[in-house]
Amino acid sequence: MRSTGRKTRGRDDHRLRFSGRTRRLVAVAAAGALAWGVTACGDGGGDDDKGGGASTAPGGSSLRLPELDGQKLDVAAVWTGPEQENFKKVLAEFEERTGAEVTFVPAQDPIVNFLGSKIAGGAPPDVALLPQVGAVKQAVQKKWAKPVNEAVKAQLAKNFAQGWQDLGVVDGEQYGVYFKAANKSLVWYNTAVFANAGAEEPKTWKEFLATARTVYDSGVTPVSIGGADGWVLTDWFENVYLSQAGPEKYDRLAAHEIKWTDPSVKAALTTLAELFDEEDYLAGGADGALQTEFPRSVEQTFTGGDQPKAGMVFEGDFVGVNVAQAKAEVGKDAKVFPFPAVGGRPPVVSGGDAAVLLKDSAAGQALLTFLASPEAAEVWAKEGGFLSPNKNLDSAAYPNDVQRDIAKALVGAGDDFRFDLSDQTPQAFGGTPGKGMWKVLQDFLKDPDDVAGTQQRLEAEAAKAYGD
């Protein structure tokens, strides 16, 4: 049941009809952040100790990979749709350069459970792309993951900021290569809606709520939320919490060094409720949002011209793929602004997918060497819907100025970012559909007045997952 305290607003003669049905680097910390430069691709070449042929990228960078004629690799990831197809193009480029044969294995969330069943059955993939830091740690703890070799480490040292290298380190050993990053601190908006409403890009949370009101008054529901996917709601919370509570508290909460009943969590949930409690600000209301999956949340923001079902949608740089699927154009029909500052500074929240070896082989190590190179990143970057933490990827590879600007800010941030909080927790708490943080925040979207109960449920689920 919805809370009786939830606010609703009358529509008068411009009431919209709602349809009932229908995932994760760096937010721009200030307007000037978009002007940060990116190091152009120079010598991205590796020093592979196994020898082999040299491949030359369009930017002139060379990467040495071993000859792997006839060697086979299975690579597992949870990517579907355009993401899967674009990653297959990266794998095809690796096949062309080495002669290896690579098979993509579709995985399901939670991927740790999927891999566990494969390993128990004696058929683990050679490489897996893990979408959570916690999942990388679990793979190491379960003794599934194998350390990378010196060739991989050389590519990482050459192409990645220390912070991104460290995310793939467990107990002092390098296991993960972060190939795909995500800027999870962006709000995308329909430019026609903003123009018609006379709305401007907000910089603070207060201004964001005021902008939502302006869009609402123009006859368009302000915000679309893909609440059927619980990870979307964790991203909402993390951005508010990081900006409001600060990075030190954020790190402590991610490590469960403070409890979810802490006053800082109460403050963040209370802030989030300022939006969630406005029933008419959400496309379809809370019930509609909870039935809307992430791709649909984007689609309903960018279809319908200047009268879509919503004017804004929050999520990462990967929204660009879904914008294109809605037959809208990034930079023209769809633009972005950084997640608004709740505290003194806008949040800087990242996500990413790390390649991890489950079988140690020359082919597997070569694939991770390739994935750590700008050449591999370039293949997907050209297709759009992709962001790389590789500092030697030429930003010209991105298909439009919006993505170029986001990429420049990402690389320019260096080590100054915080990784997705839920992705740092045990997967049972922060990465499982219908359970843990995902489910509790879905319940909170239904009843945003129940802040205390939400805190208690979050703490109970976290304590169970952490084994406290």
Image (tube, rainbow, N blue to C red):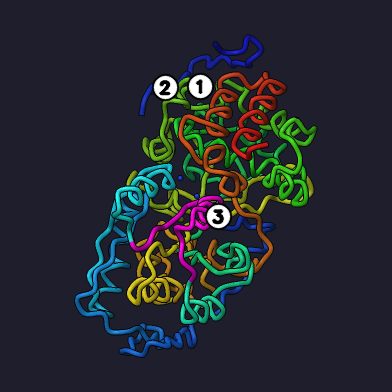
Residue 72 image position (x, y, % from top left): 24, 69
Q: Is residue 399 above or below residue 309?
A: below
Residue type of the residue flagged with mark 3: Lys
In the rendered structure, the answer to whether residue 431 lies left or right of residue 258 reads: left
Q: Is 64 placed left or right of 30 in the picture? A: left
**Type of amino acid under label 1:** Gly
Q: Is residue 298 above or below residue 383?
A: above
Residue bounds of the magenta highlight: 126-147
Eyeballing the image, is 306 above or below 421? above
Mark 1 vs 3: CB contact within 8 A: no
Secondary structure under badge 2?
loop
Q: Mark 2 — residue? A: 18
Q: CA distance from mark 2 to mark 1?
A: 8 Å
Q: Which is more toward the observer, 13 or 457? A: 457
Front position among marks 2 and 3: 3
Q: Residues within 10 Å of mark 2 (few under 14, many from 20)?
A: some
Whole-percent x and y of residue 3? Answer: 61, 12
Task: Give the amino acid type for the residue marked by disc 2 in the picture.
Answer: Phe
Residue 112 in the image: state x and y as whole percent: 44, 47
Q: Are marks 2 and 1 in contact (CB under 8 Å)?
A: yes
- Residue at mark 1: 285
- Secondary structure beneath label 1: helix
Q: Position of residue 23 (x, y in %)?
A: 46, 45
Is label 3 in a helix, a strand or a loop? helix
Residue depth check, mark 2 versus mark 1: number of the one nearer the observer: 1
Q: Is residue 28 magenta?
A: no
Q: Label 3 belongs to which residue? A: 137
Going by the picture, which residue comes out furthest to the left? 70
In the rendered image, the quadrant that contains the C terminus is top right
Taking the spot 47% from the left edge, 52% from the top edge, the residue there is 131
